[in-house]
Amino acid sequence: MPRLTAVDPSTAMGETREMLDAIQSKIGMTPNVLRTLANSPVALKSYLAVSETLSGGMFDPKTREAIALTVAGANDCSYCASAHTALSKSLNVGTDEIAARLQGKSGDPAINALLAFARKIVEKRGSVDDIDLNTVRAAGHSDSAIVEAVANVTANILTNYINLIAQTEIDFPEIDMAQTHAA
């Protein structure tokens, strides 16, 4: 049972209502995580702005979703794992690759290095070492890519933590996190 109330878009007012209506129009649903973030309009507005800005960055949607899956896996966030699995499937990412990404791995060597780095960011709370940086650089990632990866990781940490704190009701096909740990 959720510990924080998700805002009902039909009763929301002002800017909150406008943001929730825009989300509904854009993606055809209003995910519970965003309804929960709507308890603080500034938090929702901030998250939406960061997400929109990152969507114009150097990483394509599949790569951003790969990072999101890795962060969800590292933080054991069932909501985000479920949501980003659904989004990855809509981008034609295969089931085995999705399972690997939840573990911070990929069949693509460059993406594998990026995801291993993203997982290290989460596990080490940002205190990565020179080996971690040299490994991601050796796979062809520039300092610009490293900084953008950190931005993507932190955007996903926000939603992971909101969902873990709120125990947000999952409104996507649910992923069994115990199975992802066994993979």
Image (cartoon, rainbow, N blue to C red):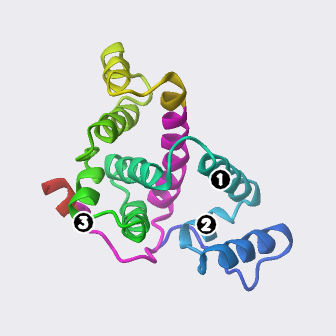
The Cα–Cα distance between marks 3 and 2, rounded to whole angstroms, is: 26 Å
Q: Which amino acid does label 2 sit on?
A: Leu
Quarter holding the C terminus? Answer: bottom left
Q: What element carries label 3?
A: helix
Q: What element carries label 1?
A: helix
Q: Which amino acid does label 1 sit on?
A: Tyr
Dots 1, 3 in contact, CB < 8 A: no
Residue at position x 69%, y 78% in the image? 25
Residue at position x 76%, y 83% in the image? 11
- Disc nearer the start of the sequence (3/2): 2
The residue to which callout 2 is attached is: 34
Question: Does 54 sit left or right of 125 as displayed?
Answer: right
Q: Residue 47 carries which label?
A: 1
The Cα–Cα distance between marks 1 and 3, rounded to whole angstroms, is: 28 Å
The residue to which callout 3 is attached is: 95
Question: Does 119 sit left or right of 169 as displayed?
Answer: left
